[in-house]
Amino acid sequence: MADLKNSKRSYDLLLKNLENRPEAFRDDEYDVYFKDSVFQEEIISKMFLEDLDSYGKGAGGELKEHKNESGKIQPASMSSVGSSSRFCYLSLKDTDFKAFEITNIKKRRVFEQKLPIVKGTPPHMDCYVECENELCFFECKCHEQFDSHDISLSESYFNKDRIVTKIPERFILERHKAIKVKNRISYQNVISPKAFGLDENPRFDIKQFLTHIMGIEARQNKVFKSEKKIIPARLIYFYFIPDSVINLNTDIKMVIDQLYKEVSTVFNHRIIKDNVKNITFELFIQFSDHAEMASKTNVRRIKL
């Protein structure tokens, strides 16, 4: 597999070039981040107040400068050309969702929807759309496929009858592993990717996938109590991959191809098929040159 760090950097530069406006970007080491004045003018100043509040309260701190792992001040995550939250917002804020075959919308879409199922930071869905007969959840991705994701989950997820408790013991590599998370110790269980048919830590974030499943099931149970019926849910993975990338014979294309294989393998794995009954999993791609409103002309469902 290609050097993921270098491939990610190359991909971000490709996205920047496709924007075709270099004057909008920073000139320092954060050159794939938009200048603060551009970010404020094009994103922040045009946000609806409820969306601004959602992102402001979200776990990712997408709208503010923050310190990176080395302690250096880094621009707001959402000002990056590779930001999944930027892609999510620009693509879904004004769409009618017909590109995803979503109809009979009951409530206005919500960004950074919390799914509180454990103590501490709850899993967040990038976008949530509640319809008359289904609950639709979006997980949006821009360049996350260039990261390697281990499967390490807090032990608190294992204290009830959930999808993670169905994983055979032989695939649990380590239990009660102490990991430092934001100045505190979290005890985690480490799961082998072989549990889901993969040989190495994947491009697809299975840990996040599992927390989303558990969070969505908790949301369904909450709705069930009020409406006396289980409302089916859709978990939509929505990636931004420009058309120009698909025809490249490069390390970038190799990573994309690997991602497709992994998503298909995980979605169709026996552990998922046998234990998740009221959630369907779907993969959609926006193939436009840069992030824009999702429509039937630039969004495509990928058959898995």
Image: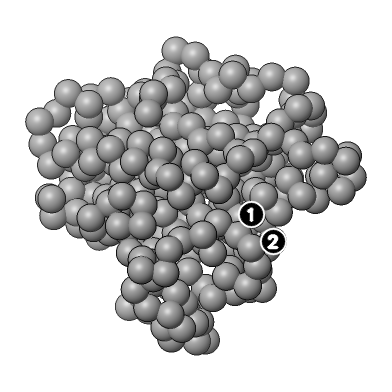
To which quarter of the image does residue 116 belong?
bottom right
Closer-to-camera residue (23/29):
29
**Label 1 close to label 2 by CB (< 8 Å):** yes
Q: Quadrant of the C terminus?
A: top left
Q: Position of residue 140 (x, y in %)?
A: 48, 41
Q: Position of residue 274 (x, y in %)?
A: 52, 44
- Circle 2: element type: loop
Q: Position of residue 119 (x, y in %)?
A: 66, 73
- Circle 1: element type: helix
Q: Which residue is mark 1?
A: 215
Q: Relative to residue 60, is residue 21 depicted above or below?
A: above
Closer-to-camera residue (43/136):
136
In the image: residue 290, left or right of residue 249: right
Q: Amino acid at mark 1?
A: Gly
Which residue does the image show at 35% across and 36% down from the upper left? Answer: 264
Q: Amino acid at mark 2?
A: Pro
To which quarter of the image does residue 131 belong?
top right
Q: Relative to residue 278, is residue 205 depicted above or below?
A: below
Which residue does the image show at 30% across and 57% down from the upper left? Answer: 194
- Distance from Cα at disc 1 to Cα at disc 2: 7 Å
In the image: residue 117, left or right of residue 2: right
Closer-to-camera residue (120/228):
228
Q: Relative to residue 158, is residue 245 depicted above or below?
A: above
Residue 232 - label: none
Q: Position of residue 10 (x, y in %)?
A: 18, 45
Q: Which residue is mark 2?
A: 116
